Amino acid sequence: MPRRVDDFRGLTQRSRLRLLHAVQRIPGRLLQELAEEAGLPLNTARDHLRVLEDEGLIARAPVETGRRGRPPNGYSPVRHTEHSPVAERRARAAQERGDALRGLDPELDHRDALGDEAVHQLDALYEHLEDAGLEPEVNDRDLTIGLLPCLYEEMIDPDRPAVCSVHARLVRDQLEQVPGPLELRRLHPFVGPERCVLVLGRQGEAAPSSRAGGIEADRGDADLERAAVRALRGLHDRGREPGR
């Protein structure tokens, strides 16, 4: 499928990932606080935040400080499309494209099994992941999504764990933006070279996937980051085994 003009190009820059991570950790913070945490000059941080806002990943809103004058803006992740016209447009366009594809190929239509709302959640999540360059492979039967490749392989060491927690939060936010029953349940980082797997489930029901291992998606950043490091080390250890 040809790339769209609004692909998430901003996520491939280390500085923007650090800044997005800072926004996700404590929503509503001001520019200066975010710049300090990300280790960026104010003007650079402001430019990066503008890109993330233009891509529908974060939104800004005035924060009352009790001081005179115009209140400064605080930045938060977009969890509801009404907070971001860009996110709303993306969700609507994803549903329209999904409906068009299902009209062309009825074998792609899983609405009878999953329901309209769940299918539209998958439409939006698929396009989010595809636009991030992660080539999602969706299994509608067991609600798993394989991701390949990891575009951040060269970025990492100190930032690799943060990359995993940033993307876990983005997936959770994306599913929340579209009304429906699906939620992110588990992450399986680095199940193969440059490959990760997401496990979804319906609210109030057990996840249909029987895949063992991984980590619960609602764990905190530190746990997600440690799990990613362990998985990566295990992958490297297996690659050094004789005969591999």
Image: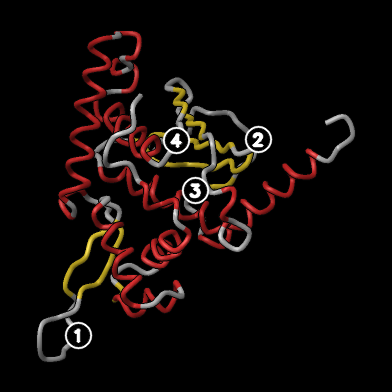
> Which numbered marker is on residue 65?
1
Q: Position of residue 71 (x, y in %)?
A: 15, 80
Left or right of 169 in this view: 163:
right
Asked if the residue under mark 4 is in contact with the one under mark 3, i.e. CB atoms within 8 Å, the reply is no
Helix, strand or loop status at disc 1? loop
Location of mark 2 (residue) = 192
Identify the mark nearer the N-term, 3 or 4.
4
Left or right of 165 in this view: 81:
left
Q: Quadrant of residue 45?
A: bottom left
Q: Quadrant of the N terminus?
A: top left
Location of mark 3 (residue) = 217
Identify the mark nearer the N-term, 2 or 4.
2
Front residue (pair 129, 16): 16
Q: Quadrant of residue 243?
A: top right
Q: Quick check: 191 above or below 59?
A: above
What is the C-alpha distance between the residues marked 3 and 1?
34 Å
The type of residue carrying mark 2 is Gly
**Count of marks placed on residues:** 4
The type of residue carrying mark 4 is Leu
Location of mark 4 (residue) = 200
Q: Can you tell which of label 3 and label 1 is closer to the viewer? A: 1
